[in-house]
Image (tube, grey):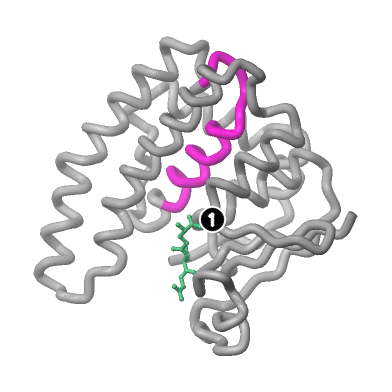
Amino acid sequence: MARKLHYFNVNGVGEPIRYLLHYGKQNFEDVRYELASWPIKSVKDSLPYGQLPLYEEGGRSLNQSLAIARYLGQQFNLVPTDIWEQAELDAAVYNVYDFWAKVLGWFKENDVARKEILKKEILNEHIDFFFSRFERDLKANKGYFGGKLSWADFVFVGIVEVSNLFFGMEIEKKYPTVQALIQKIRTLPGVKEYIATRKPYTM
Ligand SMILES: N[C@@H](CCC(=O)N[C@@H](CS)C(=O)NCC(=O)O)C(=O)O
């Protein structure tokens, strides 16, 4: 079954999908677009909502990073069978994306003064608000969002990594359980080899 992931040559919301595909030992075409040459009109116009990532499998395609990650999670035994537990993991990734929305707000801001204010808010308030809660939830669940490895852990680590790159920091330093989860994901079979061979991302 031919698989293809279209995303930018960055580690944003598409990187957890790459991790999942490598963890699942899947051959896939990792199609990467350079941000500097975006938009490529013919590609953008062909996307259902004009944005990446787009995942293709067996002649069908799917947009929305979380839908793709959850779908792959199902394939690789990273989604629990209990529907309450599934919903808890959905909540976990939405919590992570609520943090990501703050980071994106900063990233997309063009006004220099306003951008600086948003950065200060993230560094002084939002990181502590969200990460003290992520730390609490992981601690209460054996170091994972769902008590054992799940697709939510992949999404979380991807978002921490890109946020770290944006702000030139290691957010996880103050949060040992978060730090441990990042290490666990980075050393998973498949993910570890992928990280060792990928080109380092820059801002
Ligand atoms: N909710 C979407 C958001 C996708 C999104 O924001 N994609 C950005 C890159 S991370 C994009 O395609 N930007 C280029 C554009 O909008 O032209 C998802 O999670 O997949």
Residue drawn at (53%, 41%) of the image: 155
Is 90 left, or right, of 27 in this rendering? left
Q: Of all residues shown, which one is farthest toward the bottom?
A: 41
Q: Describe the element under mark 1 as helix, strand or loop.
A: loop
Seen in the picture, residue 92 relative to 140 is either above or below; the reply is below
What's the magenta region? 146-162
The residue closer to the viewer here, 13 or 195, is 13
Picture coordinates of residue 154 (x, y %)? 57, 37
Residue drawn at (73%, 49%) of the image: 194
Is 154 left, or right, of 58 in this rendering? left
Would residue 148 be counted in the magenta stretch? yes
Image quadrant for the C terminus? bottom left
Residue bearing mark 1: 64
Picture coordinates of residue 192 (x, y %)? 71, 40
Ligand 1 under 8 Å from disc 1 Cβ: yes
Residue drawn at (57%, 56%) of the image: 14
Residue drawn at (15%, 49%) of the image: 121
Question: Which kind of residue does numbered mark 1 sit on?
Answer: Gln
Image quadrant for the N terminus? bottom right
Picture coordinates of residue 133 (x, y %)? 30, 24
